[in-house]
Structure formats: C-alpha cells, structure tokens
Image (cartoon, rainbow, N blue to C red):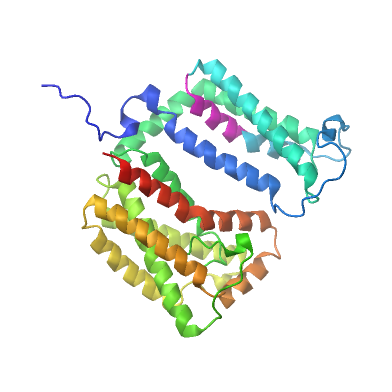
Amino acid sequence: MHTGTPKTAPSHVDGDSAQLPLLPRYLAAAYLALIVYASLHPFSGWRASGISPFVFLEAAWPRYWTLFDLSINVAAYVPFGFLLAQSFGDRPCRPCAALLAFVSGAALSFTIESIQSYLPSRVPSNVNLLCNSLGAGLGAMVSLCCGQRFFARVLRAQQRLLAPMPHAEYGVVLTGLWLLTQLSPETLLFGAGDLRHIFDIPPALRYDAPSFFALETGIIVCNTLAAGLIMNMVFAGRRPAPRALAWFFAAALLIRTLAAAVLVGPQSALAWLTPGAGLGLLVGGAALALALLLPATLRIALAGMALMAGTVLVNLAPLNPYSVAALAAWRQGHFLNFNGLTRLAASFWPFLALSYLILLGRRP
C-alpha cells in the first residue's frame, strides 16, 4: 500500500523542479557576500566628498586600461548571474529568470560602485559597472542553456552523498566555509568566532604559556566536536563516518599547512602544531568518536554547546605571538583582502552553524 512521502523526507529529493533552486540559493548568497566584501573592503575611512555618488556614470573611458582588468571584472560576476538565474528557477519562466538575474547583477554592481564613492581607497567606475553587468548577463545566459542539466547532476550527486534530511545543502556550504577558514594562518587552529577584531576589543587576558595551552586545547576540542558532528550530520549514512571524518580533518590540516607555507613561509608550515594543538586534536578526536554514538537529537545539542563554548574560549584567549608574527608577514604581501575575508568567515562561522543546528532541531 502506498503510504506517501514521510514528513522527514529530505527537501532535495521531493522533486527536481521544486527543489533544484535550494543549493543555488545558498551558493548565490555566499557569492553575494564575497562580492560585497571584496568590493568594499576595508570598510573604513568613510567620507562624503560633496559630489553626487552617481557622477561616475558620466566619466569618460579611462585612459589606462588592460584587457586583463576588463576580463576579471566580467568573470567576477559570471558565477553570480549563473547562480542567481538558477535560484529563481522557472518562475515565471526560464528566460524571465535569466533576465531578472541580469538586472539584479547590474543593480548590485551599480549599488556597489555608488557606495565606493564614499571610500577613499576605492574608485567607482562606469567601466566596472558595464563589465560586471555583462558578466552577470553571460552567467544568466549560460544558466539558460545548461543550468538545469548541471544542477540535475548535482542533485543526483546529493542523493548519493548527502544524508536524507532537510537543509543538507546548507550543511555542505557550511563545511566548505569551515575549510576556507583554515586558510588564515594567523588565527588559532580551528579557532572560530573571534569577534574582537571586528569590534576592536582588546584581549581580556595577557599571554601566559600554561593558560594559553589550556585555552588552545579547549578551543580545538570544541571546534573539532562541532565541525565533525555537523559534517557527520550532512553525510551520515552515505559514507563510513570515521573514515569520512578522518579525511575531512586531514584536508583541513593540509590546507592549514599549505596556507602557512605559501603565505608566511616554508619555515612556518607546521607552526600550528603546538603542544596544545596536538593534545586538542587527540582529545577532540576521541570525544567526537564517542559523540557519534549518541542519538541524533543529542548530537545536535552537543554540537551547539561545543560551538558556544568554543566561541567563548576563542574570545578569551590572549594574542598568540605566532599569530601576530604571521599576520605581520602576511601583510607584506598582496593578500590583505583575502586575509580579511578568511578572518571574517572564521568570525561568523559559529553563528551560521548555530542557525543550521536550530533548523535541524526544529524538523519533525
């Protein structure tokens, strides 16, 4: 007897036409944040020049320009137009969705160029607006031609790899974002949720080797638990959990090592491997192995508590002398915007992850 689809059926397997936009929406939101951050960083020195913020529209074609610069400005908006067109789906029709994506991309570029008039470190440009709009339009056209086929394949991969649960796509974005935060060599290993640099708050504690050792260990244990449990929830039942989690954390440590070697120097490649980090990985791994034996509801609660505890600890931790030295060395290069992006992602990741856990906790 046919019983119908259970209430706990995953959102991404209820039907291609209705559910395909889920992952593009998450990715489009993440890409939107990336564009805004890259375009308005460092978000300081705001000033009113006394002229209209739209005067750049009347400027003549710049004297100095390169094909490479124009291509970069076009290419930067192609993924956004592609993802946005897929986010709109077939409503009211596919060509209309593509047109709306193009208009939205152009409107975003116009808004950002206008806001840049108030930043002394930025120069608004009608050429950038033209190139960005063209990129959004190209992305929308690509979406119109092959977007549905591409995400249909992605959907089939989701059904093979992801757990049968709502909002699994959100979890995929979160795990990818967590791996991205490991590219920041001046932050503590797995340290996420540090808001002090955003609000310019001085450290609450002075550096002391024993207390720093304890705090570093606690931070790594908490974040290993939280990230591991979230990753396990996303992929549960599709891969052997211990093996998948081992590969996940091995990838995170490899990213951390390569980032430190490239951005700071080969001599700093393994500087993250401190006594506190080693102990934290061992204790966190053991705690995670035991936590996987708990029921799903308790795993969600434990992940939330680990997130909150890790965030508190990372905001109490004193400045790490290695982190200060690494940041000074990094700033000598051309990675300021990238540095700010990874630190911002690390700062807000626990709060994004907590919202995901709340969504999981509210499901039937």
Seen in the picture, residue 81 relative to 357 is either above or below; the reply is above
**Viewer-proximal residue among 71 and 7:** 7
Q: Give residue 121's position: percent from left, percent from top.
A: 78, 51
Q: Residue at x 15, y 24 (%)?
A: 3
Q: Is residue 97 above or below residue 115?
A: above
Residue stretch rendered in magenta on the structure: 78-90
Q: Nearer the viewer, residue 45 or 138?
A: 45
Quarter of the picture containing the C terminus is top left
In screen coordinates, is 41 left or right of 31? Answer: right
The reply to whether residue 210 is in sight is: yes
Residue placed at 47% from the left, 23% from the top? 89
The image shows residue 21 at horizontal and vertical percentages of 44, 29
Closer to the camera in the image, 336 or 204: 204
Q: Quadrant of residue 142?
A: top right
Q: Position of residue 236 (x, y in %)?
A: 27, 47
Rendered view: 113 above or below 269? above
- Asked if residue 325 is positioned above or below residue 24 in the image, the reply reads below
Instruction: Tell me the chief SS of the magenta region.
Output: helix
Quadrant where the N terminus sits is: top left
Give the x, y percent position of residue 275. 43, 79
* Picture quadrant of residue 103: top right
Q: Residue at x 70, y 62 (%)?
A: 333
Residue 107 horizontal side relative to residue 146, left or right: right
Task: Examine the structure image and report whether residue 21 is included in the region drawn in magenta.
Answer: no
Q: Quadrant of residue 187?
A: bottom right
